[in-house]
Amino acid sequence: MGVSTDNSQVRCFWRKMWSLPVPHKIRHFVWRSCRDILPMKTNLMRRKVVQDGICGQCRNKEETLGHVLWNCQKARETWEYSKVASFGLSNNVSFHDFLWQMLMHNRVEEDKVAKNGGSYEQEDSHPLGAVEAKAFEAGLLFAKDIGIQDLILEGDSITIHKAICETSTPPSSVEPVIEGMHTICKDFALC
């Protein structure tokens, strides 16, 4: 991790990573990626298992984790077809640093939402509901894109929950998003 991290931040990072509600193989992949112990050609070449560290797909650059996941032309083509944005990392950024940056970015965004929520609380509670509705929509699109069939949505806004379950009319600020979510939900076996 970066130089400015302390042990409590590192422990918090790993506690968060190991408690993610994902299959163990995903957590194991993250751990191995952060330790840079995946069988990338550059690692295999260092151990004298292979003769060269050039990527087998593009045959243009060294096969590092960053190259395989983000920088290789084949990887970029994959990200283009995905609804998930490309991260645009350089080959020099470690997977560990990438995850750390994402964690810190999300932390800043959560703080920003919490502060904005406090300022809107007196006037109108819909802005946070709109944020949650858009987050649900993004999650649905991502789940659909990667082929998930059974999905459970969890959130904090009872207004959004009732609107998604069609037990109440959504606020006008999120009505188009909710209607779009209803259409997307038809593609799932369980939503």
Image (cartoon, rainbow, N blue to C red):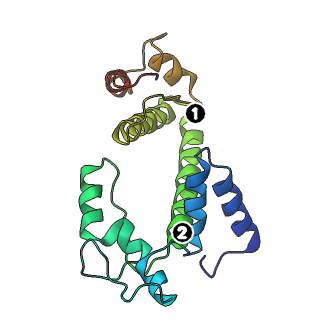
Who's the residue at 27% across and 71% down the image? Answer: 57
Please state the horizontal and vertical placement of residue 48, each as a whole percent of the image: 48, 89
Neighbor class of circle 2 (other Cα within 10 Å; few <14, some 14-19, many 20+) is some
Please state the horizontal and vertical placement of residue 73, each as a whole percent of the image: 24, 69
Please state the horizontal and vertical placement of residue 161, each as a whole percent of the image: 52, 22
Who's the residue at 24% across and 81% down the image? Answer: 60
Q: Amino acid at mark 2?
A: Ser
Question: Which mark's residue is nearer the viewer, 2 or 1?
Answer: 2
Who's the residue at 57% across and 30% down the image? Answer: 154
Quick one: which residue is furthest to the right in this view?
Answer: 8
Q: Which quadrant of the rendered structure holds the N terminus? A: bottom right
Rounded to the nearest angstrom, the CA distance separating label 2 from label 1 is 41 Å
**For residue 103, above or below residue 172:** below
Please state the horizontal and vertical placement of residue 102, each as a whole percent of the image: 51, 61
Who's the residue at 37% across and 76% down the image? Answer: 90
**Horizontal side of residue 110 vs 55, given as left or right:** right
Q: Amino acid at mark 1?
A: Glu
Does the residue at mark 2 contact the one at mark 1 (Cβ under 8 Å)? no
SS at mark 2 in the image? helix
**Horizontal side of residue 175 vs 77, given as left or right:** right
Q: Which residue is mark 1?
A: 121
Residue 124 can be seen, yes or no: no
**Horizontal side of residue 163 vs 108, given as left or right:** left
Q: Which numbered dot is residue 33?
A: 2
